[in-house]
Amino acid sequence: MRVFLKWCGWVVALAMIISPLTAAERKLNVLFIISDDLGSQSLGCYDNVQCRSPNIDALAGRGVQFMRTYTQYPVCGPSRAALMSGMYAQVIGVTSNGGATNFTKNLGSRPSMSQHFLNQGYYAARVSKIFHMRVPGDITAGVNGPDHAASWTERFNCRGPEQWTAGVHQHLTNEKLKPDLKRQIHYGLGYGGAFYVVRGETDGAEQADHKAAAKAIELLEQRADDHKPFFLAVGLVRPHVPLVAPASFFEPYVAKQMKLPPGVKDDWNDIPKAGISKNSERSGLDADAKKQQVLEAYYASVTYMDAQVGKMIDAVDRLGLRDNTIIVFTADHGYHLGEHDFWQKMSLHEESTRIPLIIHVPGKKPSKSPALSQQIDIYPTLAELCGLPRPEHVQGRSLVKSLDDADHVVHDAVYCLRGRNDHLLRTDRWALIRYGPGGVELYDMHADPHQFTNLADKPKYRDDLAELQRQLDAKLKAINPTASR
């Protein structure tokens, strides 16, 4: 009997050794989801009452939602280069979409965000657009774009038909398009900036975002089986134009019922010429009815994208990964939808620079944080949460303390670049925009959150302006754009 009991003890001990680790004992995984051209003001959880984003809203309800997060650059390529390097755009040396090809050379031996996890023993995968891809060209071609190969264990492109999607087509703006009925030419066709709309006739299974969600779920299933820690980055291309979604996602929206953003008469009178962004007049949106059609299609694209987010989050829960997987949802930059009569990105105003950021960490209580934060803070935050060292080159600050204390102050001011010499400095109260060609904007964000009244020329605010100019100059010096790479 003693021998039998001793043998049983050995069996139990051996079983404990070879059994899978409990959730508490495993490394934390990361599911990182980034949407393309998504302004935070377009989501329900950021107070949009027209657009339906139930899955992202639900994630916000169980995670920490950062209410004032800003991109480092209001264009795809530079913003993603900053995000993945953890450095300001001018330091990584990517200050245009075309400059995205310089990322690998400029980064050198320093690890990107996902590469840092890869170097620490994680499986790291890219699904669709994480670094810059030209939309729709690189999506219809199904190619990598200027990717950083060293960032990934595996990478997967998700080819989709984009403007060639079967369905009802509509071109709302005045760009000269060059349709290619043979589908052999992928670039220079004009769809990358046009409000071109397709109500698809299928359930969307042929679309890049549908494929991205399916591939992500496949990879989650694999990691649930082998228990390897993972950093899974999933890029969703909607709501980037062309605005393509299955017709069913348009059903909740009726163009004539869409409410345009508030405005004021002669809004541009106190905005410098350099601050006048892509607008209705230049784009051919010459009637409110057309603008409402843009909102209808944009919101349909957001809701379609949101459905893909929901699929991935459901998979995390179904596969038993919820207790040891961090889920991040964000966007590369903001997006104008008629505010100041501006459209799309490339502006330093609030709607173009503020981005959604939701971080769900197992065991952390849900909250809404007003802390000023910025895109390059994501890298050090995830590294700290997963117990990884912080690489020396990373310029962002960890947001971990704000995950436990929503009111914890991370930054006194955050910063965004446009071009080479246009700057935004955003403090708790103020937004200072300074243009290299000349011109300054100053907004009291407490009293004027829609930025209708430029105070830069008001004598009453002369001292405030001078102090903010000093702070911006100090920030630029601290960023040190001439640092060796």
Image (cartoon, helix red, strand yellow):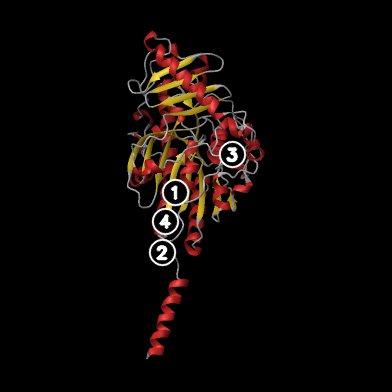
Amino acid type shown at disc 2: Thr
Q: Which mark is residue 324?
A: 4
Q: Residue at 50%, 53% (x, y): give it.
A: 216
Q: Residue at 46%, 47% (x, y): give it.
A: 384
Amino acid type shown at disc 4: Asn
| Residue 483: quarter of image | top right
Residue beneath disc 1 = 385
Q: Nearer the viewer, residue 12 or 29?
A: 12
Q: Alpha carbon of mark 2 to alpha carbon of mark 4: how far? A: 9 Å
Q: Is residue 455 above or below residue 353?
A: above
**Does label 2 or label 3 sit earlier along the sequence?**
2
- Callout 2: SS: loop
Q: Alpha carbon of mark 3 to alpha carbon of mark 4: how far? A: 31 Å
| Residue 94: quarter of image | top right
Q: Is residue 339 above or below residue 300?
A: above
Q: Nearer the viewer, residue 397 or 296?
A: 397
Q: Position of residue 2 (x, y in %)?
A: 38, 89
**Does label 1 or label 3 sit earlier along the sequence?**
3
Tell me, yes or no, if residue 149 can be seen here.
yes
- 296 left or right of 395? left
Residue beneath disc 2 = 22
Q: Residue at 35%, 44% (x, y): give it.
A: 404
Q: Is residue 455 above or below residue 109?
A: above
Q: Position of residue 42 (x, y in %)?
A: 40, 34
Residue beneath disc 3 = 133
Amino acid type shown at disc 3: Met
**Does label 2 or label 4 sit earlier along the sequence?**
2
Q: Look at the image and tell me in which quarter the N terminus lies.
A: bottom left
Q: Is residue 36 above or below residue 216?
A: above
